[in-house]
């Protein structure tokens, strides 16, 4: 080993490396021939670059000396999230009766009785309904699947609360109970979403994630985990018998599959993701058993994962599990139901948001003058085109400067054009884009029937020309959407290829329930600001 590789890495005393340090470490071991930046060289010894893609035994010995070993975070973060959700439930139960009492004129002493009762009953009911079950990855990421059970909790508790309100002499007990439960439900949804958002930002709750496999899919997983920080999964390396050094993994190889048990213990692995590997069936089964014996959660990226968005639950045929992919059905009834949701949702949104839209229009006019609305021709459903409406977020003449800024385009595919710090964006425009407020005029497009509340991303005509394959055009079976999978899963951070794949999965597996799920997931995505620029 070279002399410079004998130095010790700088240890991180809180047990979890900071984000910047992790990213520099990833760059230092990214791929053969990669040159670490000077700043990275100061934070991570040159030994890190020396061990990337070295034989597994050497890699293990050096990384044992160079990387901090931290205790597993999986159980800890699940417990922390449960405590935060419990606090949210208690707060919602206690606050709702007090707020309703102020609105309906219920005496304070009666409101305190109802608040005490609901502060105990609400978390108890959510516990019974399984809302504190062991946290899997999906429940960590989003509370959307919990909405139906929370509605059931509200309905179930409305009757005993109404009875209690009548016993203690509350005026109009049934009305008071129903309004209180509606308020408790809304408060609980908001507080639970806030609890998850706070947990997502905690560095101490990141989980050290090991990837089994080293091909293109493994590289995509590593990249997505670094990009989607809300998942709280930090890729620390891969294990594989045949490493693919030319795919740009961005993480070191920690050993072969036979080394997996030692790697799990040595590097404090919290979670394992099995991507495509050339390992045999028996080797992968053995790897899963090793993880389960050590109580490490395992996720398996399935074959044909591009088509599984609309898959049903596992079916069983003679004990053999199978994922069922139904035939896409966009019947007249389905289209009518979707259109009804669009009209109702857009109408309500325009009425409620009219004052905000007026203020935005004034702010745009005051800052930069010119037109308030930006109009652009986009590809619609089928072979149609329409004029998309947005609040103007750039200075006038921004399109004329696009050619001179082309070198700053952050999308390497050359199809989409996005710059994180685009100099053409106004100060007001930056705020509008951060919270997607520039897209509010598109509710008018929805009412006109040119767009839908949920659908594929509305492409500019130049992007539509890049849809070269036949299956790409399936995304035009539905109207483009104000929101969609692209909005929920990363917005501008997604590549053109990822966006097209997500849109295809959405169209192929469309259902009204899926639309409602995406609508509920859109607000947290907007608040997080991920990919908004």
Image: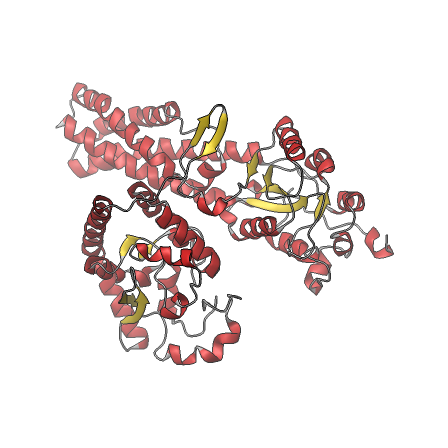
Q: Is residue 98 left or right of residue 317?
A: left
| Residue sticking out furthest to the left | 172
Q: Residue at x 61, y 42 (%)?
A: 209
Specify the quadrant of the image occupied by residue 124. top left
In x, y percent, where is residue 490? 45, 54
**How are the residues colored?**
secondary structure
Q: Quadrant of the C terminus?
A: bottom left
The answer to whether residue 474 is above or below residue 188 is below
In x, y percent, where is residue 217? 58, 49
In x, y percent, where is residue 345? 22, 50
Q: Is residue 307 left or right of residue 511?
A: right
The answer to whether residue 364 is above or below residue 184 is below
Q: Is residue 54 left or right of residue 158?
A: right
Specify the quadrant of the image occupied by residue 474. bottom left
In x, y percent, where is residue 116? 30, 26
Q: Is residue 439 left or right of residue 46?
A: left
- Nearer to me, 460 or 102: 460
Q: Can you see residue 107?
A: no
The answer to whether residue 484 is above or below residue 134 is below
Q: Can you see residue 523?
A: yes
């Amino acid at each position: 080993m070279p002399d410079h590789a004998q130095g010790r890495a700088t240890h991180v005393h809180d047990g979890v490396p900071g984000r910047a340090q992790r990213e520099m470490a990833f760059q230092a071991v990214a791929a053969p021939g990669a040159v670490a930046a000077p700043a990275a060289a100061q934070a991570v010894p040159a030994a890190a670059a020396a061990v990337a893609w070295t034989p597994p035994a050497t890699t293990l010995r050096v990384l044992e000396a160079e990387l901090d070993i931290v205790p597993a975070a999986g159980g800890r973060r699940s417990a922390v999230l449960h405590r935060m959700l419990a606090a949210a439930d208690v707060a919602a139960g206690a606050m709702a009766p007090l707020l309703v009492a102020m609105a309906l004129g219920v005496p304070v002493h009666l409101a305190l009785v109802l608040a005490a009762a609901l502060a105990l009953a609400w978390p108890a009911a959510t516990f019974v309904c399984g809302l504190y079950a062991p946290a899997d990855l999906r429940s960590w990421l989003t509370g959307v699947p919990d909405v139906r059970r929370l509605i059931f909790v509200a309905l179930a508790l409305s009757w005993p609360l109404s009875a209690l309100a009548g016993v203690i002499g509350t005026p109009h007990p049934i009305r008071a109970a129903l309004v209180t439960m509606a308020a408790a439900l809304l408060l609980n949804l908001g507080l639970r979403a806030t609890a998850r958002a706070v947990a997502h930002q905690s560095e101490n709750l990141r989980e050290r994630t090991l990837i089994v496999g080293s091909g293109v899919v493994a590289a995509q997983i590593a990249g997505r985990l670094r990009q989607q920080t809300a998942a709280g999964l930090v890729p620390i390396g891969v294990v594989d018998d045949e490493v693919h050094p030319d795919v740009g993994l961005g993480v070191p190889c920690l050993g072969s599959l036979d080394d997996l048990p030692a790697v799990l213990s040595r590097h404090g692995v919290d979670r394992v993701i099995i991507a495509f590997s050339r390992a045999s069936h028996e080797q992968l089964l053995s790897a899963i058993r090793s993880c389960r014996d050590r109580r490490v959660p395992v996720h398996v990226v399935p074959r044909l994962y591009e088509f599984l968005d609309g898959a049903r639950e596992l079916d069983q045929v003679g004990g053999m599990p199978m994922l069922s992919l139904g035939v896409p059905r966009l019947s007249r009834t389905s289209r009518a139901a979707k259109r009804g949701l669009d009209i109702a949702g857009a109408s309500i949104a325009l009425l409620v948001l009219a004052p905000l839209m007026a203020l935005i229009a004034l702010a745009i006019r005051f800052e930069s003058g010119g037109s308030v609305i930006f109009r652009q021709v986009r590809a619609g459903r089928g072979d149609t085109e329409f004029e998309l409406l947005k609040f103007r977020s750039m200075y006038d003449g921004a399109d004329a400067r696009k050619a001179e800024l082309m070198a700053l385009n952050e999308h390497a595919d050359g199809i989409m054009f996005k710059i994180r710090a685009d100099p053409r964006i106004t100060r007001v425009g930056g705020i509008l884009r951060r919270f997607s407020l520039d897209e509010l005029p598109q509710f008018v497009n929805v009412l006109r029937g040119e767009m839908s509340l949920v659908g594929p991303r509305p492409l500019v005509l130049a992007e539509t020309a890049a849809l070269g394959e036949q299956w790409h055009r399936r995304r035009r079976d539905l109207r483009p959407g104000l929101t969609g999978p692209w909005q929920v899963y990363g917005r501008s951070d997604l590549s053109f290829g990822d966006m097209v794949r997500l849109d295809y999965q959405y169209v192929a597996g469309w259902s009204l329930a899926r639309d409602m799920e995406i609508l509920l997931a859109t607000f947290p995505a907007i608040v997080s600001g991920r990919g908004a620029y």
